[in-house]
Image (cartoon, helix red, strand yellow):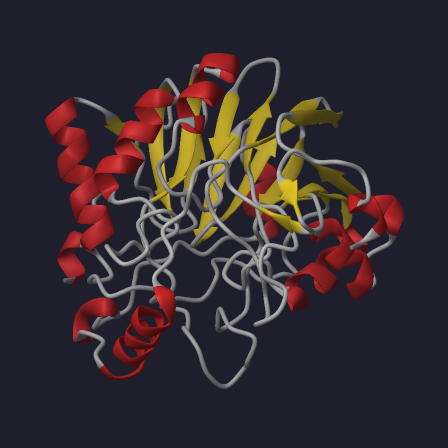
C-alpha cells in the first residue's frame, strides 16, 4: 500500500477501494463471453464510416479566447480556461486507449491540438487511472508545463512512480477540496472501479470533481454508474452552470459502472445542472452500441424533458456564460 494511503479512508477496505453500494459481478463465464463478443462480435457501426468533424485549435486561438471558456478535446479530455489559467481533465492524446501501442481501441479522430501546442497548465485534474482517462505518455509530456496534478487517492502515487515530482502532486479523498489559482477543486464520489493491470484492481480511488470559481460552477463526472451520490453532490455544491457527464460505453452487462443516457440526464437533474455537456463518447470504441447512439439518445431525452444540451464540435469553444450550443454535428455522418 503506498504511503499516502496509510491513513484511514472510508473508501478503503482490506487494502482495496470500494463503492458504498453492492456491485454487480458478471462472473468468469459472463466475463469471457463479453471478451469473446468484443473480439469477434462487434457491430460495424461502433466505428464511424467517415471522418468526424474536428475544429483545429492553435495556441494563439486559445490565448485569444475569453476567460471562462471550455474546449472539449475528445472523449473525457476537456480544456478549461478559468480565472486566467488553463485546466485539463483526464488528458488522453494517445492513438489507442490501451496498454499496447499496436492493439486496443483506436481514436476516431486526432486531438484538435497537440500536446506541444497546449499552453502552460495550472493543473491536470484526474478522475481515475483507466487507460482512456490516464495516458502515461501525455502525463510525462505535460510534466514540464503543469503546476499541479490533482488526483484521487493512489493515482498520485502512480504519477510519482512515473517520475512526476511529488511536490506537484495533490491527492484527495472524496469530499475533500483545495484551492488552486483561485479555483476550488473538490473531489466528489463516483461509482466505478480502477486498475491498469490484472492484479491492481481498485488499488487506487476513482472520483468526480466540482470545479468552482467565484462566478461559475462546473461538474466533471469522470466515469460513474448512476447512484444517489449525484443528488448529494447537487445538494451540497449545486447548482452548476455546466455538467460534463459521461454518456457512452454503456451496456446492460456492466450496469453499475457506466450510465445509460436516461441515467446521465437524471444525474444532470440531480446535480441541479443548467446545461449538460455529454462526454466519454465520439473518440473511442469501448462498447457494443453504435458510435453515435449515446448522442442520439441523450439529445432526444433532453428534448423530451426540456433540458439544455451542449454538443459542440470537438475543439469548438464553449463559453460558460452561455454554454447552450446544440449542433447535432454527428447526424450528417451516420
Q: Residue at x 87, y 50 (%)?
A: 166
Q: Residue at x 56, y 55 (%)?
A: 194
Residue 33 % position (x, y): 28, 75
Q: Is residue 3 left or right of residue 93?
A: right
Q: Nearer the viewer, residue 189 or 110?
A: 189
Residue 83 visible in image = no
Q: Nearer the viewer, residue 209 or 62?
A: 209
Q: Residue at x 14, y 30 (%)?
A: 303
Q: Nearer the viewer, residue 112 or 58?
A: 112
Q: Which quadrant of the figure has residue 328?
A: top left
Pick the quarter of the image with the C terminus: bottom left
Q: Which quadrant of the figure has residue 246?
A: top left
Rendered position, 64 above or below 292: above
Residue 201 visible in image = yes
Q: Which quadrant of the figure has residue 157?
A: bottom right
Residue 72 % position (x, y): 45, 46
Q: Is residue 201 left or right of residue 219?
A: right
Amino acid at each position: 500500500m503506498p504511503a499516502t494511503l496509510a491513513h484511514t479512508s472510508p473508501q478503503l477496505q482490506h487494502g482495496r477501494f470500494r463503492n458504498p453500494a453492492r456491485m454487480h459481478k458478471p462472473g468468469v463465464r459472463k466475463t469471457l463471453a463479453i471478451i469473446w463478443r468484443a473480439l469477434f462480435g462487434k457491430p460495424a457501426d461502433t466505428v464511424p464510416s467517415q471522418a468526424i468533424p474536428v475544429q483545429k485549435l492553435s495556441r494563439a486561438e486559445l490565448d485569444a479566447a475569453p476567460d471562462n471558456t471550455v474546449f472539449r478535446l475528445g472523449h473525457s479530455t476537456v480544456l478549461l480556461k478559468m480565472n486566467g489559467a488553463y485546466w485539463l481533465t483526464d488528458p488522453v492524446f494517445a492513438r489507442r486507449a490501451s496498454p499496447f501501442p499496436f492493439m486496443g481501441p483506436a481514436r476516431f479522430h486526432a486531438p484538435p491540438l497537440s500536446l506541444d501546442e497546449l499552453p502552460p497548465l495550472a493543473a491536470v485534474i484526474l478522475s481515475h487511472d483507466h487507460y482512456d482517462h490516464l495516458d502515461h505518455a501525455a502525463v510525462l509530456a505535460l510534466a514540464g508545463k503543469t503546476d499541479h496534478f490533482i488526483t484521487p487517492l493512489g493515482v498520485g502515487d502512480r504519477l510519482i512512480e512515473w517520475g512526476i515530482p511529488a511536490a506537484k502532486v495533490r491527492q484527495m479523498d472524496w469530499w475533500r477540496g483545495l484551492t488552486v489559482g483561485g479555483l476550488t477543486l473538490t473531489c466528489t464520489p463516483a461509482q466505478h472501479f480502477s486498475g491498469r493491470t490484472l492484479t491492481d484492481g481498485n488499488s487506487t480511488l476513482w472520483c468526480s470533481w466540482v470545479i468552482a470559481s467565484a462566478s461559475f460552477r462546473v461538474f466533471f463526472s469522470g466515469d460513474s454508474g448512476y447512484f444517489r451520490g449525484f443528488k448529494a453532490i447537487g445538494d451540497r455544491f449545486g447548482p452548476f452552470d455546466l455538467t460534463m457527464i459521461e454518456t457512452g460505453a454503456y451496456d446492460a452487462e456492466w450496469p453499475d459502472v457506466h450510465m445509460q443516457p436516461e441515467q446521465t440526464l437524471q444525474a444532470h437533474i440531480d446535480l441541479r445542472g443548467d446545461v449538460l455537456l455529454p462526454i466519454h463518447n465520439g473518440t473511442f470504441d469501448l462498447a457494443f452500441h453504435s458510435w453515435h447512439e449515446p448522442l442520439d439518445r441523450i439529445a432526444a431525452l433532453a428534448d423530451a424533458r426540456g433540458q439544455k444540451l451542449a454538443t459542440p464540435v470537438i475543439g469548438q469553444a464553449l463559453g460558460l456564460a452561455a454554454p447552450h450550443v446544440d449542433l447535432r454535428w454527428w447526424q450528417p455522418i451516420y
